[in-house]
Image (tube, rainbow, N blue to C red):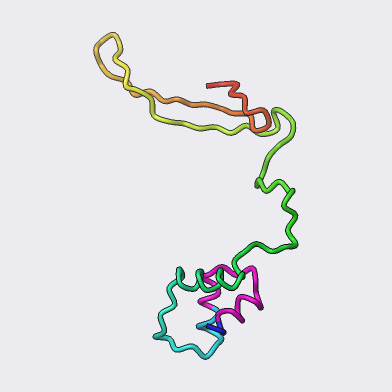
Amino acid sequence: MEVLLATKEANPKLSVQLVIRETLKHRDVPDDLPLPPSTVHRLLARHGLMSGSDSQDTDTDRRRFAFQSPGQLWMSDVMHGPTVRIKDRSKRKTYLIAFIDDATRVIPYA
C-alpha cells in the first residue's frame, strides 16, 4: 500500500494504470499480487492523491481548439438520411451533410 502511495506522490501526473505499472516494474511487489485499478484508485483517492494539481489555473479555457472569429474554422458532419422513392419507383439513399462555424455555431450550409 505504501509503495503505491509513494509512487503516486513522486509522480502526481501518473494515471492509475501507470502507477500500477511503475510499482510492479520498479518496486519489490510480488507479481502475483492483484492490483485492480478500481482498488488502487480508491486507495489513492482516500489519501487525497487523485485530485487535480493545485497549480492549475481553473479559469483557463480547456478546449483543445476553438476559434474567436467567424469563418476561421468550419466543421462538418454527415449522417444517413431517409430512403426516397423516385419517379420510376426505385429507391435512393439520401445523406444529410452539414457545416458548422466553430466560433458562432451557425450552420451556413446543409
Q: Dividing the picture into quarters, in which one does residue 102 lie?
A: top right
The dominant secondary structure in magenta is helix
Q: In this view, does 100 lie above or below 15?
A: above
Q: Where is residue 83 in the image (x, y as percent from the top left)?
A: 32, 21
Q: Is residue 3 above or below residue 104?
A: below
Say which residue appears at 69% left-offset and 64% top-offset: 53
Query: Which residue sits furthest front?
Result: 46
Whether 6 is among the magenta residues is: yes
> Which residue, as the protein is rendered here, is positioned at the far bottom?
28
x%, y% of residue 24?
Answer: 50, 83
Q: Write down the quadrant of residue 14 in the picture.
A: bottom right
Residue at 65% over, 62% down: 52
Q: Position of residue 32 (x, y in %)?
A: 39, 85
Q: In the displayed image of the protein, which residue is found farthest to the left?
A: 89
Q: In this view, does 29 lie above or below 34?
A: below
Specify whether residue 47 is painted magenta. Answer: no
Specify start and end residues of the magenta stretch as a single range.
4-21
- How many marks are shown on the rendered structure? 0
Identify the residue shown where x is 64% and y is 68%. Answer: 13
Residue extending farthest to the top is 87
3 left or right of 69 in image: left
Q: Where is residue 16 in the image (x, y as percent from the top left)?
A: 53, 70
Q: In the depicted view, which residue is nearer to us: 99 or 56? A: 56
Residue shown at the point (46%, 72%) measured from the top left: 39
Which is more toward the observer, 53 or 72? Answer: 53
Tell me if residue 23 comes above or below residue 73 in the rendering.
below
